[in-house]
Image (cartoon, rainbow, N blue to C red):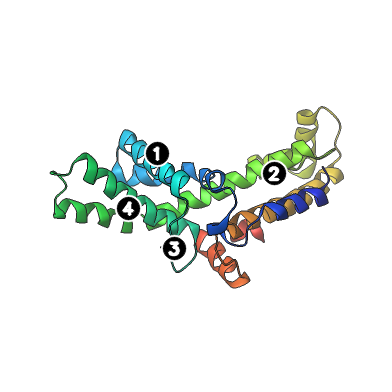
Amino acid sequence: MSESEFGQQRLKDISTRWSEVRDINRFVLRYTDAMNRLLKMILKDEDTSHDVLQAFLLRIIERGFRDDLPNSGRFRDYLTKSLRNAAIDYFRKAQPKQLSDEALQQLESKWDSTDQQWKQSWTRCLVDRAWQQLEHFQYETDNCHYFDVLRISTEHPEANSTRCAQLLSDSVGKTVSADSYRQQLSRSRRRFAEILGTEIRETLDDPTPELVADEVAALGLKEYLS
């Protein structure tokens, strides 16, 4: 697959509104790791977190997205609200007598104190997905070493291009010059930025340039896109 074909395929898969994606299950499952980390931060129990997450995913599979979407149109805000409701519903069903008003208020208040950790977890999820997409692109594209080049650059930030080219040569089993390494590094960074930008836009219900810029700033992702 060429770069242009890859880009065209990605455009076909993009919905301008995440709340109207064609494959809801597949879209939501992208962010399972981030959701699981959030629930563990709040509930402090792995088994309970797993049960709440499974209940939420089952509801999504059966009913899709609810109409009460956040005003911001950010998918991460929708997940925060939905997971909070799923946790409260879980405890109401599992411990109806033990869940006092005070305990309920304490549970709800915990969500407000984890905003920064949730953003960090969400950022990690988006970046990890971008790495996965870059690796897939390398696998599908002839004579492409974008993933390996960027990985080497990240793992050896102090190494010069000659040393990195040698590391790449050892990895791919053929000689790669320093000039070729530098060219692929520049291209791999652009490709990574494009993939990550797409990932960000797909989590916004109205991805205007202004909203995308706000989300990039809120998540601290500018360094990846510059």
Q: CA distance from mark 2 to mark 3?
A: 31 Å
Q: CA distance from mark 1 to mark 3?
A: 21 Å
Q: CA distance from mark 1 to mark 4?
A: 13 Å
Q: Earlier in the sequence, mark 2 or mark 4?
A: 4
Element marked by disc 4: helix
Element marked by disc 3: loop
Instruction: Residue at 42%, 41% (x, y): give it.
Output: 58
- Kind of residue sitting beneath label 1: Gln
The reply to whether the C-beta atoms of the residues labelled 1 and 3 are less than 8 Å apart is no
Q: Earlier in the sequence, mark 1 or mark 4?
A: 1
Instruction: Residue at 56%, 58% (x, y): give it.
Output: 20
Question: Depth-wise, is mark 1 or mark 2 nearer the camera?
Answer: 1
Residue on which the image places disc 2: 134
Instruction: Residue at 44%, 69% (x, y): give it.
Output: 71
Q: Quadrant of the N terminus?
A: top right
Residue on which the image places disc 4: 85
Question: Depth-wise, is mark 2 or mark 4 nearer the camera?
Answer: 4
Residue on which the image places disc 1: 54
Q: CA distance from mark 4 to mark 3?
A: 13 Å
- Kind of residue sitting beneath label 2: Leu
